[in-house]
Amino acid sequence: MKTFFSIVSIQTNPISSEKVVMGVLAITGNEIYFDYSKSKLGLLDKLAPTKIGIGSMAKNALQQIKQKVTETNKVLIKDQQELVFEKSIFSKDYISYLNKYNNGILHFSEPASLPFDFTGEKFMQYYYNFVGEVVVLETKKEVVTFAKKIKPAFEKVGLEEKADLKFTFDPLTFNGILKETHIPLITKNGAINTIQIVDFSLGEQTVVHHLYETKIIKEALNVFAQKANTEVTKIKIVFEEPIQGTLQYDLFDLSVQNYKEDFDFITPDLLEKETEVICNSNNIKFSEFLLTL
């Protein structure tokens, strides 16, 4: 498919309809480009003194777009697929809708199609033409995702003999589980030990849902352990700390503060040590323990 793009502006004077061009959003079939001017963002409160707090509101809105673009590009790279526009907020129709009806702080120009394939270099050119600043795109390199970083820890020789990987909780066996629910690792050696994974680079709703689900698993295991006359340790949640100052970091920090009594939060390095200990232990699979009941 060909590229289409939209200019992102902010109205600073409602009487004269003056706008400040803040950024450019360009969308191709397999990658989305977006960036905005940090220097102009810092001047918004002076440019629009009658709109109190416009700078912070604009910053929040632009960061949310940036985050969503990053998340979508991660999926496109991971799955090597093209964007399914009818299911995406980055469709031409949706951007056109925002142009006509959105009353928020940001203004999107009517999306314009381009008769050529878009590239990072072309985005830099368009960004400079419309925003008046140079944007420096990061050199593409292999994306080492959180999932790739922790994958070796679950592939250790002998681990599958001592623990269930991708265990499924059956609602008929575990009270409180309403549908089949999964956990990356569960094992038993005296007490029931479990490991969960939460990727805080994903969207807020995904992360929150995952944490809620993990707490339900915790409560179900506690009930089960009492009936089975055994114990269960805190679920260990593997995480990678997001960059401070981002929305992802704020959610991470809030999650740790709220759930530090329920879970143990561990880094990928500690996960490596944890699975190594399991491999060299007398642990048995949790599924094997279930057969003894």
Image: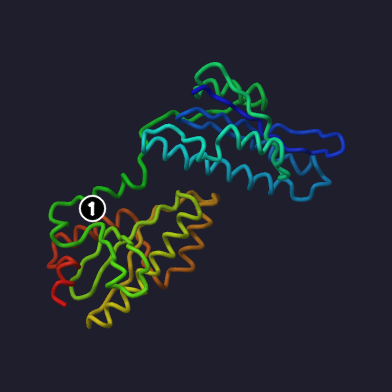
Judging from the image, the colouring scheme is: rainbow
Q: Quadrant of residue 186?
A: bottom left
Q: Is residue 40 left or right of residue 67?
A: right
Q: Label 1, secondary structure: give it.
A: helix
Q: Decide: is 71 above or below 233.
A: above
Q: Which residue is pictured at 22% across the width and 80% down the height? A: 228
Number of callouts in the render?
1
Please state the horizontal and vertical placement of residue 261, each as a whole percent of the image: 42, 73
Amino acid type at circle 1 is Phe
Q: Is residue 124 left or right of residue 151?
A: right
Q: Which residue is pictured at 54% across the width and 24% down the height? A: 3
Please state the horizontal and vertical placement of residue 112, each as a whole percent of the image: 63, 24
Q: Residues within 10 Å of mark 1 (few under 14, many from 20)?
A: some
- Give the residue furthest to the top: 115
Q: Quadrant of residue 95?
A: top right
Please state the horizontal and vertical placement of residue 84, each as a whole percent of the image: 47, 35
The quarter of the rendered structure image containing the C terminus is bottom left
Q: Which residue is pictured at 33% across the width and 67% down the height? A: 235
Please state the horizontal and vertical placement of residue 246, each as a whole percent of the image: 54, 49
Q: Is residue 190 left or right of residue 142?
A: left
Q: Read off the residue under disc 1.
A: 154
